Amino acid sequence: MKPAVKLDHLAVACTSLQDGTAWVEDRLGVALQPGGKHARYGTHNTLLGLADGLYLEVIAKDPDAVPEAAHAWFGLDGFSGRPRLANWICQTTDIAAAPAVAGPPRALTRGDLSWQITVPDDGGLPLDGGFPTLIAWAEGTVHPATRLQQSGCRLVSFEVCHPEAEGIRSMIGLSDDRVRLSSGPLEMSATFQTPHGLRTL
């Protein structure tokens, strides 16, 4: 049985957190908030609170960190070029049922946050990001989106174009009118309603 999932958050990857944050702020016209560090994978992030219990994350390798794991996650070891939307993360209540392509679940904590998240052994993105990273927040953990200041932004649509779109759709039970999977060369785009009108990453 394929796991039922729902969209949790979107991630923008970058080589410099400062540059990635500035890129998102320029395009959406709103300020991001400080996030935190992920000691296991040697990364740090900034965050943007969205309506409907979602959030946007900008993530990069932390040049000052000595990671505990052999690889970073979210494909950041091999990331290059300009900041871009690179990953989508979906909640599941049965992470043990995650398809093998997602990678095994890893237990992580940061402060009072506790969760399991699928990460392939090489730290890459499943199907180059076409397949979502799956996450299961621990019971009693307050979701990060509820802790963030609201930015006045709301996700209108998120599109993933991938050569194996039909196969991806068959592996997860996702029911969300905002998310569209289409067949073609790999590309992601997200459109937001912002205080300045519609903006797209």
Image: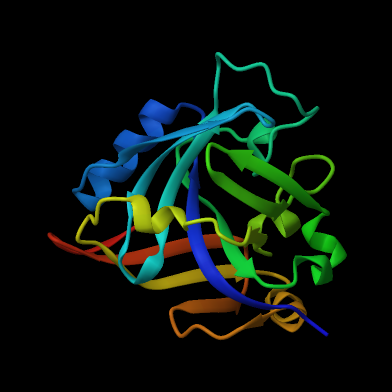
**Is residue 201 at least partly visible in the picture?**
no
Tell me what residue is drawn at x 58 percent, y 33 percent.
Answer: 80
Q: Visible in this render: residue 78?
A: yes
19 relative to 32, above or below: above
Quadrant location of the N terminus?
bottom right
Closer to the camera, 43 or 149? Answer: 149
Of 61 and 95, nearer the camera is 95
The residue at the far left in this view is 196
Placement of 70 over or under 168, stated as above or below: above
Residue 190 in picture, x, y percent from top left:
40, 64
- Say if 130 sits above or below 35 in the image: below
Colouring of the image: rainbow
Query: Which residue is outermost to the front?
Result: 140
Residue occupying image coordinates x 71% and y 81%: 166
Q: Residue 107: x percent and y percent?
A: 74, 47
The quadrant of the rendering that contains the C terminus is bottom left
In this rendering, would 125 be left or right of 176?
A: right
Q: Residue at x 22, y 55 (%)?
A: 151
Whole-percent x, y for residue 163 in the image: 70, 70
Residue 191 located left or right of residue 171: left
* Total marks placed: 0
Q: Is 78 placed above or below 108 here? A: above
Q: Residue 6: x percent and y percent?
A: 56, 74
Quadrant of the rendered image containing residue 194: bottom left
